[in-house]
Image (cartoon, grey):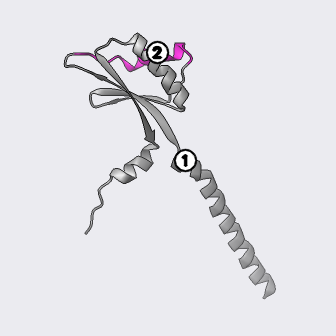
Amino acid sequence: MKSRASLKQTLSLLALASVALTAVMLLPTLFRSETALQIRASRQGAMLPDGFYVWQRLNAEGIHIKSITPDKNSLVITFDSQEQSSAAEKVLRRLLPENLDIAHSEQNADWVSRIGQRRQSIG
């Protein structure tokens, strides 16, 4: 009888420990934010730069890019740190024509931001 209760208690503690460990591992992901630059044409007829060209130029400057994604009429470049984003902004302002706007923004992890944007359906 005692060994069965002891086994149940041990399994309960093990389950609780694994849940706590999982929560601790996921916590940084929930609150992680990444910085991004968005490049868009400031006037009609202006062409966006090629993503590969942007990657090559920033990589040559030692700037690590997390991703480059076309988004509607813009190009979104994400970085792991604010420092990389600021350095990339300086390089791109020097490199790209003046008819392109470069906006600096901070984004939450994609899946976290999508939760707030999703409409709830009832029924």
Location of residue 9 in the rendering, given as x and y in whole percent from the top left corner: 73, 77
Q: Is residue 39 magenta?
A: no
Q: Residues within 10 Å of mark 2 (few under 14, many from 20)?
A: some
Q: Quadrant of the N terminus?
A: bottom right
Classify 111 as above or below 14: above
Residue type at the position of mark 2: Val
The answer to whether 123 appears left or right of 12 in the picture is left
Residue type at the position of mark 1: Thr
Taking the image as drawn, is residue 89 in sight? Answer: yes
The answer to whether 115 appears left or right of 45 in the picture is right
Identify the residue at horizontal 60%, vertical 57% (top origin): 23
Q: Which mark is residue 91?
A: 2
Residue at image mark 1: 29
Location of residue 75 in the rendering, given as x and y in whole percent from the top left corner: 35, 26
Location of residue 28 in the rendering, given as x and y in whole percent from the top left corner: 58, 48
Closer to the camera, 82 or 116?
Answer: 82
Classify 122 as above or below 104: below
Q: Residues within 10 Å of mark 1 (few under 14, many from 20)?
A: few
